[in-house]
Every structure is written in C-alpha cells, then in structure tokens.
Image (cartoon, helix red, strand yellow):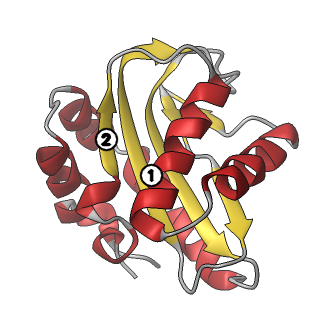
Amino acid sequence: MDLSSILAPAAVKVVGNMSSKRRLFLDLGEIASSVLGLRQDDSVDALLERESLGPTGVGHGVALPHARLNGLDRVAGAFVRLEQPLKFGSVDRQPVDLVFALFAPLDAGVEHLKALALVSRTMRDPSICAKLRANSDPTTLHAILTESPAVKAA
C-alpha cells in the first residue's frame, strides 16, 4: 500500500478560510462525494461520529480525521491544506492547517489501520509538512504526498 493508491489527485484541495471543524468536514464530505462517489451526508456524519470519540488533531498543525462507511471497496483519502489555520481541539491545542482524511469500508480491518499508520507516518515528517505548507497548487501537494520516501506501508 502506498499513498498514491489511497489519494487521487482530484482529492487534494487548498482552502483559504474555514469557519469551523463542521465546515471542514462538509468540504471533506464534498470531496468524498465527487471523487469517491460517497453520499456527502454519510461521509460528514461518519467523520463527526468518529470525532465525537476524541479529536483527530494529532499535533503540529496536522489532523487525521477518519471514518468507516458503506459503499467503499477500498481505503481512500482526501487532503486539504488550509491557508488560515483552524482551531480543531488538537492534542497540543495548536490550530490545524494540514488535514488528511481517510475513508474506509466498514469491514476494512487491518487495511484501515495500515493506511492510518502510513498517513500518520507521512504527516509526522517535518520536511514533508514544510513542503506542503510552502505550496498552494493541488497538483504539487499531491506529488509531495505521493512521492515522499515515507509513503510505503509497513
């Protein structure tokens, strides 16, 4: 498994200003709808339900929201870079500007965990995050995410 199999180029977006976490999840649901063919409401509800268990802001300006849904045959992702950081309730209480969401089938099991570990490992790399923050072109962001050395699953 690698990030290029999880993240489609069309699932990468740059957003100027986000008013709330819910609004962010609506945008992620829109990406899930247009790129993955999922119902936007189902995606948003699943992200919110998972978030209610505890915030998925992992620190250093990074959030990794994730959800399991019907209607998927594989793990897939969406990436949003926020130009204005958003209060997210992260573990370090810092606002978030890099958001990598994962959507997995209900029965994904180990595949979901492998994908989450892969994304987490990638987004913990300070050099990758610095490159992501320095670019605003979705094509470039996709290339940074999918061409980094950390993109191979264990």
- Which numbered circle lies on residue 31? 1
- Which numbered circle lies on residue 13? 2
Q: What residue is drawn where x is 22% and y is 54%?
A: 142
Tag 1's secondary structure? Answer: helix
Query: What amino acid is labelled 2 in the image?
Result: Lys
Q: What residue is drawn where x is 67% and y is 40%?
A: 56
Q: Is residue 121 visible?
A: no
Q: How many marks?
A: 2
Depth order, front residue of 97/22: 22
Residue 22 picture quarter: top right
Of circles 2 and 1, the one toward us is: 1
Asked whether disc 2 touches disc 1, contact meaning CB atoms under 8 Å apart, the reply is yes
Q: What residue is drawn where x is 28% and y is 72%?
A: 4
84 w.r.t. 149: above or below: above
Q: Is residue 7 visible?
A: yes
Q: Earlier in the sequence, mark 2 or mark 1?
A: 2
